[in-house]
Image (cartoon, rainbow, N blue to C red):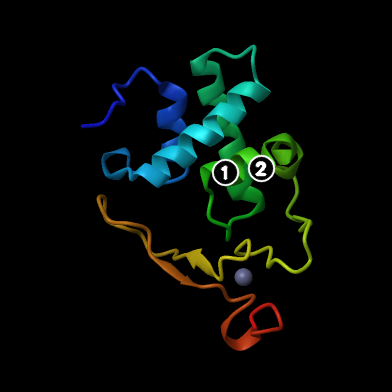
């Protein structure tokens, strides 16, 4: 069974914000969650676990508001953590690497808007900005 027993609120919140089902955690996904959470805790040493969970929720909202087409992952949240307070107010997300598609962060896939039944993974569709009709040099 899971070693998660409900007391690690920030861990659970981070997983929830990223759409991760804790009942289906793989070793890699657990490792990514733990690694990202450690970075967030290191960045916010004065926060309690609950306070950090609340900030994670706020920043995850800001991330989704500014980058609605981009899949939120724990590592993406950790990566963009310092800029999310301001990003939440802006629709423009300046990509740091011009070779990486900002819509899908280079994944070439984005989450489908179709609602997903509980227990099923989010469906993904091809990124419209770097595949399909607008296929570009981004994909060799
Ligand atoms: Zn793309």
Q: CA distance from mark 1 to mark 2?
A: 6 Å
Q: Is mark 2 within 8 Å of ligand 1?
A: no
How many other residues sit within 10 Å of disc 2, few (<14), some (14-19) or many (≥20)? some
Judge whether 4 appears above or below 133 on screen.
above
Judge whether 73 appears above or below 100 on screen.
above
Q: Residue at x 47, y 32 (%)?
A: 34
Q: Quadrant of residue 131?
A: bottom right
Q: Residue at x 38, y 64 (%)?
A: 123
Quarter of the rendering occupied by the C terminus: bottom right
Say the numbered circle drawn on residue 79.
Answer: 2
Q: Residue at x 56, y 31 (%)?
A: 56
Q: Is mark 1 within 8 Å of ligand 1?
A: no
How many other residues sit within 10 Å of disc 1, few (<14), some (14-19) or many (≥20)? some
Q: Are marks 1 and 2 in contact (CB under 8 Å)?
A: yes
Residue 76 image position (x, y, % from top left) = 60, 46
Judge whether 90 appears above or below 5 on screen.
below
Quarter of the rendering occupied by the N terminus: top left
**Rendered-image quarter of ligand 1:** bottom right
Residue 63 image position (x, y, % from top left) = 62, 45
Apparent side of residue 56 relative to residue 124 in the rendered image (left or right): right
Apparent side of residue 99 relative to residue 64 in the rendered image (left or right): right
Question: Can residue 57 be seen here?
Answer: no
Q: Secondary structure at mark 1?
A: helix
Apparent side of residue 111 relative to residue 39 in the rendered image (left or right): left
Judge whether 78 appears above or below 47 on screen.
below
Q: Secondary structure at mark 2?
A: helix
Furthest toward the bottom, the residue is 133
Say the numbered circle drawn on residue 75.
Answer: 1
Question: Can residue 84 be seen here?
Answer: yes
């Amino acid at each position: 069974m899971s070693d998660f027993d409900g007391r690690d609120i920030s861990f659970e919140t981070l997983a929830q914000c990223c759409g991760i089902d804790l009942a289906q955690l793989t070793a890699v996904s657990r490792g990514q969650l733990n690694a990202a959470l450690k970075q967030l805790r290191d960045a916010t040493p004065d926060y309690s676990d609950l306070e950090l969970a609340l900030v994670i929720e706020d920043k995850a909202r800001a991330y989704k508001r500014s980058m609605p087409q981009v899949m939120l992952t724990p590592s993406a949240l950790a990566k963009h953590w310092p800029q999310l307070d301001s990003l939440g107010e802006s629709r423009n997300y300046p990509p740091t690497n011009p070779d990486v598609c900002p819509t899908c962060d280079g994944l070439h896939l984005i989450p489908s808007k179709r609602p997903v039944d509980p227990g099923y993974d989010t469906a993904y569709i091809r990124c419209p900005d770097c595949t399909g009709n607008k296929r570009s040099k981004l994909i060799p």
